[in-house]
Image (tube, rainbow, N blue to C red):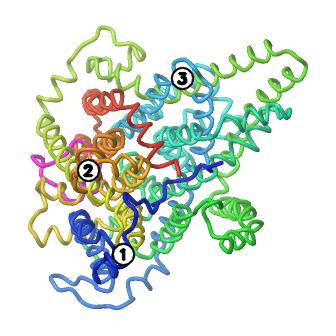
């Protein structure tokens, strides 16, 4: 039985290796396919080297300098030593840890619950999965503005709804909030939980899609055998589902933790780190020092000192991706793995205990509130499972089926309400008149419907220019990523050459390397090349986060294509390049479309680089342009809702049309072993 695990780079061979006598001295030293591999890997090597490795090296050098007027002075390790007593930096690190830990816990629980609900549905699964995917698809700027309006303490729909249902005063009685109406983003006690809530809303779809792909790969006969043995639904979940998803959960959580720990755009757009510094992550501290105060060395030191944390997560991820199944390992290797079985089984519990202790120390005011909410979710799930199991054991299969179906529909309804509520608010607000928006009349349904906000948006803002800029930058960066990733992915999956494993690890390292580590040296490089305030600055830098992921996904997808098809093309007289173009690429269409969707969405939604590199209105992209529409406390909610709708529609349509290819590409490229 094959275990469910992330994609690894197999030693696939298109043809049997020739005998030693048929290889030249260079081929024996560099590998049989080194020439073609060098050709295919060259574009990616240039981009990764120039846009990731060189900037990181430059950042290390910059961190040892300090700016005095127009001069840059070498100060050694002073920038790092100053961080020891820097209270703002300490607060930023703690905030990043708290934000990441709570967000990942709830994303795992809700994502797994959503995946299980969808996996067991026979009808409407594709439609429901598409609906749940929408929050992940919509740009972060849309997420932030919609939730800012919903969480407004006076006029926000969240407080109005909780007041109308009587839940608001109950939250005060339970001491979950101090007063009512609650200032979700302005209260120091509630700001961080509110930002975590929005991040969970944004991230649950990614977990759901990954877990769904993992569930599909678990053999059905395992569940059948467990059912025959009399296992309850909870026992099947603990003994079959969780072990089958172990690798998928670990990799998904690791990747998401890296992204969340280095999050900048969502926090900045929601609170700008306030009130005070209660929600300011370490990335915002680095931005403040490097961009606002022009102390590049101090800002670089902030990002680099976090590198060991990111490095630890990357090391864990690399180990998982290189992990092989016991059946394919030599006997000595399998014996070595068995020695550490107990330690590996105990490791998750040790990590859980350490993280729990740190959370209790770092955020006692949040810890027990999160524990109550999480406990309620788990108790409800356990109670439903217990009722169904009891009815089944008593022979009431029809009753158990009814209870299970009812519970499933109630859970799905609650999940859809949580997911689609903010998006519904965007839709109706975009078609309200300015009077309805300001006076908060007809909150749930515009009366009458009007396009006033769309007219005002194009009349008062260069929205059309922002839209065109975003379209051009996204299309160009996606094309670059797709071409380079297809060539590099094929080389790493099929060709034999020395250094393939090292190149693969480098790709993975650049994939998880956060933008927070790169934006300072890239900004300096763009200033030197006079490319700031131009679309070229974004086209050149966006491959830093699109290309590595695209390559990683396609390596797994190319490896899943049967080698025999390519061998047949070679026997028929095709060259390796012809076989790649005529056989492999057409078969890899789902993987290529999945990569295109991911890279296009990431480029369409990107905020940090565009926010730092672009200041002129004529070159702004949609996320930065929409952020600039807010002037102080004046928030044009109607126009922002109209802009959000126009920004989201193209991406949602693309995902709706390409959802099947996305799921297939993820399953073959990132989950199957």
Q: Position of residue 403 (x, y in %)?
A: 75, 17
Percent x, y of residue 465? 11, 39
Label 3 SS = helix
Question: How far apart, in angstroms, are the residues tagged by discs 1 and 3?
Answer: 62 Å
The residue wearing badge 3 is 161
Q: Is residue 104 above or below residue 390?
A: below
Image x and y of residue 591, in percent: 36, 43
User: Magenta segment, which residues?
Assistant: 604-622
Q: Which residue is mark 2?
A: 579
Which of pointers 3 and 2 lies earlier in the amino acid sequence? 3
Q: Residue furthest right?
A: 394
Circle number at residue 256: none
In the image: residue 216, left or right of residue 352? left
Note whether residue 141 is visible: no
Q: Nearer the viewer, residue 647 or 583?
A: 583
User: Dot 1, how many residues are within 10 Å of its Cα: few (below 14), some (14-19), or many (20+)?
Assistant: some
Residue at 25% in and 53% down = 481
* Residue 611 belongs to the span the image colors magenta: yes
At 29% from the left and 22% from the top, the residue drawn is 430
Q: Marks 1 and 3: which is nearer the front?
A: 1
Question: Of the residues under marks 1 and 3, which one precedes in the sequence?
Answer: 3
């Amino acid at each position: 039985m094959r275990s469910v695990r992330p994609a690894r780079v197999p030693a696939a061979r298109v043809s049997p290796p020739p005998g030693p006598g048929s290889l030249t001295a260079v081929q024996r030293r560099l590998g049989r396919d080194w020439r073609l591999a060098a050709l295919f890997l060259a574009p990616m090597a240039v981009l990764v080297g120039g846009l990731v490795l060189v900037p990181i090296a430059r950042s290390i050098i910059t961190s040892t300098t300090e700016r005095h007027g127009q001069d840059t002075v070498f100060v050694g390790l002073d920038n790092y030593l100053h961080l020891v007593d820097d209270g703002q930096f300490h607060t930023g690190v703690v905030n990043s840890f708290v934000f990441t830990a709570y967000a990942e816990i709830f994303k795992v629980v809700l994502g797994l619950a959503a995946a299980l609900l969808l996996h067991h549905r026979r009808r409407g699964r594709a439609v429901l999965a598409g609906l749940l995917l929408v929050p992940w698809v919509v740009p972060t700027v849309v997420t932030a503005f919609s939730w800012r309006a919903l969480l407004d303490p006076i006029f926000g729909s969240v407080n109005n709804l909780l007041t109308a249902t009587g839940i608001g005063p109950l939250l005060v009685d339970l001491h979950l909030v101090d007063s009512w109406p609650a200032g979700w983003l302005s209260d120091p006690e509630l700001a961080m939980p509110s930002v975590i809530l929005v991040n969970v809303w944004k991230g649950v779809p990614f977990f759901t899609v990954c877990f769904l792909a993992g569930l599909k790969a678990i053999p059905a006969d395992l569940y059948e055998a467990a059912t025959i043995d009399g296992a309850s639904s909870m026992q099947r979940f603990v003994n079959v589902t969780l072990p089958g998803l172990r690798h998928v959960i670990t990799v998904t959580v690791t990747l998401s933790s890296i992204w969340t720990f280095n999050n900048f755009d969502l926090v900045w757009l929601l609170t700008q780190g306030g009130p005070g510094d209660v929600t300011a992550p370490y990335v915002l501290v680095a931005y403040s020092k490097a961009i606002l105060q022009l102390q590049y060395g101090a800002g670089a030191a902030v990002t680099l000192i976090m590198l060991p944390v990111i490095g630890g997560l990357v090391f864990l991820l690399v180990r998982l991706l290189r992990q092989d199944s016991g059946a394919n390992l030599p006997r000595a290797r399998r014996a070595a793995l068995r020695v550490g079985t107990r330690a590996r089984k105990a490791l998750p519990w040790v990590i859980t205990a350490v993280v729990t202790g740190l959370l209790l120390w770092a955020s006692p005011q949040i810890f027990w509130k999160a524990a109550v909410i999480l406990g309620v979710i788990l108790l409800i799930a356990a109670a439903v499972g217990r009722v169904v199991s009891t009815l089944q054991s008593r022979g009431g299969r029809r009753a158990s089926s009814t209870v299970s179906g009812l519970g499933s529909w109630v859970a799905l309804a609650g999940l859809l309400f949580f997911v689609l509520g903010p998006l519904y608010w965007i839709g109706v607000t975009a078609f309200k008149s300015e009077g309805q928006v300001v006076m908060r009349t007809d909150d749930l349904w515009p009366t009458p419907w009007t396009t006033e906000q769309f007219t005002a948006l194009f009349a008062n803002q260069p929205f059309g220019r922002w839209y065109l800029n975003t379209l051009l930058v996204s299309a160009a960066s996606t094309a670059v990523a797709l071409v380079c990733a297809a060539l590099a992915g094929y080389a790493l999956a099929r060709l034999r050459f020395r250094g393939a494993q090292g190149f693969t690890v480098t790709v993975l390292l650049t994939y998880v390397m956060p933008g927070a580590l790169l934006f300072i040296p890239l900004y300096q490089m763009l200033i030197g090349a006079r490319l700031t305030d131009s679309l070229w600055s974004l086209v050149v830098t966006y491959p830093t986060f699109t290309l590595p992921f695209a390559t990683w996904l396609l390596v797994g997808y190319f490896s899943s294509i049967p080698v025999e098809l390519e061998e047949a093309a070679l026997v028929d007289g095709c060259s390796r390049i012809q076989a790649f173009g005529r056989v492999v690429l057409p078969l890899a269409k789902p993987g290529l479309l999945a990569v295109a969707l991911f890279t296009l969405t990431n480029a369409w939604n990107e905020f940090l680089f565009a926010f730092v590199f672009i200041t002129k209105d004529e070159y702004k992209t949609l996320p930065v342009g929409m952020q600039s529409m807010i002037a102080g406390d004046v928030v044009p909610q109607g126009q922002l809702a109209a802009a959000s709708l126009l920004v989201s529609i193209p991406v949602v349509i693309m995902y709706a049309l390409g959802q099947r290819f996305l799921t297939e590409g993820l399953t073959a490229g990132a989950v199957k072993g």
